Image (cartoon, coloured by chain):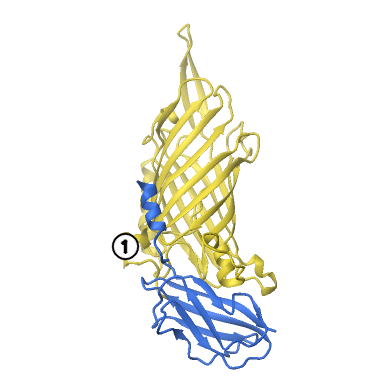
Chain colours: A blue, B yellow
């Protein structure tokens, strides 16, 4: 019975803490051309009011356009647009609150060749 | 004895009063998720249920006791009383199948514990806590080795993730270590056993109940951390939520005239998978030396995150209300 209950719980689609599923640019990747935006898809629905995203260069200066937020058509997608950026190392900082109240935050690097 | 019980009660009350008002749910420090490990106790407090934890191993012969196949099925309920303070209640059913003689089954003593997280750093993914556990003597069955006296084990716990390392060491960032060091203190220093031989002579055998250092640590590599924060290496489910780990579970008798300083323990390599409501773990149990044994055992656990399953019920606390799964910053 315990095993059946566990399997039922495991089969649930979402996570209590919303963790990133994948992103563009990919976590830790090197891209050839400056990306027009940073987009992160999460494995659960996230709250627009409490979710933030920003991009910094290697000098800790914010370089995104400040228009980051949860996508209106897809509440698992957090995105921010970027101006044309020079080559270098960048880091994306995000913070989201899942629909059930869990807060998750993190950051990841990417590089423009 | 009453004095020791009073100390435990006082510690519990003091802990409740002293608990700070900000903390998060199970095993989070910054972006680091610490799973509940199978072999050693965790550095965090949580609303969780481990049921069942199953271990099977063959113990070596010792003195007059033959080698014995031992199977344990245990459960533990953990509950926060404040964001940083919690208690747990655990029980174990044990089956002993010796090479010679009849098999025995029965319950071991109940174990109560309290724990207080006194330091937490999100940027450094660091948790420090202290606690005391109480093996309640006389609540289990003597035939399977349950002691008739209480044993208290004060202990310190730590958890540290390496996400604060420089980017040049990015593949090391998913590594975390947790550990504990405690001393088990029996409330009865020696137990007398009365053996009667065939002629009716009574022989008194004195068995020392030694204090022992209970220590151990884990080394973990969190693949979710790797994928989400360091480098997307393209791991598909379920591998992207797995944590390969090795646990070192040790004990060193301190004041036993025959065994003092002779460490026994196991090295447990395994994997934990964590999901929304549950985690599942399985480990091999490898004796660290001949004193511990020569046979490899197995350890498995099903673990429920109660604060995620029913936060209104299981994350309720007497002084802070419903904590919820995670406290907002």
Residue B11 appears in the rendering: no
Q: Position of residue B93 (x, y in %)?
A: 41, 37
Question: Which one is in front, A75 or B119?
Answer: A75
- Residue B329 lies, with reference to residue B1, above or below; the image says below
Q: Position of residue B228 (x, y in %)?
A: 55, 70
Q: Quadrant of residue A110?
A: bottom right
Residue at figure coordinates x 63%, y 75% from the top left: A28
Residue at figure coordinates x 37%, y 72% from the top left: A101
Q: Is residue B67 left or right of residue B276?
A: right
In the rendered picture of this protein, how many numbered marks are placed on residues? Answer: 1
Q: Position of residue A26 (x, y in %)?
A: 59, 76
Which quarter of the image is occupied by the C terminus of chain B? bottom left
Q: Position of residue B33 (x, y in %)?
A: 51, 64
Q: Name the secondary structure under disc 1.
A: strand
Chain containing the residue with disc 1: B
- Which residue in the protein does label 1 denote? B317
Task: Say few, some or many: other residues with alpha carbon within 10 Å of mark 1 (under 14 / 14 to 19 / 20 or more).
Answer: some
Question: Which one is in front, B5 or A96?
Answer: A96
Which quarter of the image is occupied by the N terminus of chain B? top left
């Amino acid at each position: 019975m315990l095993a059946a209950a566990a399997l039922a719980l495991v089969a649930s689609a979402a996570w209590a803490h919303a963790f990133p599923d994948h992103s563009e640019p990919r976590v830790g990747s090197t891209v050839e051309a400056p990306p027009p935006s940073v987009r992160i898809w999460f494995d659960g629905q996230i709250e627009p009011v409490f979710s933030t995203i920003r991009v910094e260069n290697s000098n800790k200066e914010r370089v995104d356009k400040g228009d980051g937020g949860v996508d209106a058509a897809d509440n698992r997608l957090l995105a921010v647009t970027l101006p044309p950026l020079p080559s270098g190392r960048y880091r994306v900082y995000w913070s989201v609150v899942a629909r059930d109240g869990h807060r998750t935050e993190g950051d990841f690097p990417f590089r423009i060749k | 004895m009453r004095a020791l019980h009073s100390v435990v009660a006082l510690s519990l009350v003091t802990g409740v009063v002293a608990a700070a008002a900000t903390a998060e749910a199970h095993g989070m420090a910054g972006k680091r998720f610490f799973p509940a490990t199978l072999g050693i106790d965790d550095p965090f407090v949580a609303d969780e249920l481990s049921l069942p934890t199953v271990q099977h191993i063959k113990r070596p012969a010792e003195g007059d006791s033959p080698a014995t196949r031992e199977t344990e099925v245990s459960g533990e309920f953990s509950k926060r009383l404040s964001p940083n303070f919690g208690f747990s209640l655990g029980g174990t059913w044990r089956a002993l199948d010796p090479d010679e003689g009849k098999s025995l089954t029965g319950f071991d003593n109940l174990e109560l514990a309290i724990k207080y997280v006194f330091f937490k750093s999100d940027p450094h993914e660091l948790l420090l806590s202290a606690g005391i556990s109480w093996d309640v003597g006389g609540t289990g069955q003597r035939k399977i080795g349950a002691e008739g006296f209480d044993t208290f084990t004060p202990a310190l716990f730590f958890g540290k993730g390496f996400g604060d390392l420089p980017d040049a060491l990015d593949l090391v960032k998913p590594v975390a270590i947790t550990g504990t060091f405690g001393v088990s203190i029996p409330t009865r220093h020696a137990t007398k056993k009365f053996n009667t031989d065939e002629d009716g002579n009574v022989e008194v055998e004195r068995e020392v109940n030694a204090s022992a250092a209970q220590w151990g640590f884990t080394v973990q590599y969190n693949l979710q951390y790797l994928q989400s924060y360091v480098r997307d290496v393209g791991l598909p489910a379920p591998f992207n939520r797995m944590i390969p780990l090795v646990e070192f579970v040790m004990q060193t008798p301190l004041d036993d005239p025959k065994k003092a300083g002779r460490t026994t323990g196991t090295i447990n390599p395994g994997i934990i998978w964590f999901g929304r409501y549950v985690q599942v773990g399985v480990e091999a149990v490898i004796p660290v030396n001949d004193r511990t044994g020569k046979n490899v055992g197995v350890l498995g656990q099903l673990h429920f995150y109660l604060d995620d399953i029913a936060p209104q019920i299981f994350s309720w606390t007497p002084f802070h209300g419903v904590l919820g799964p995670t406290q907002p910053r």
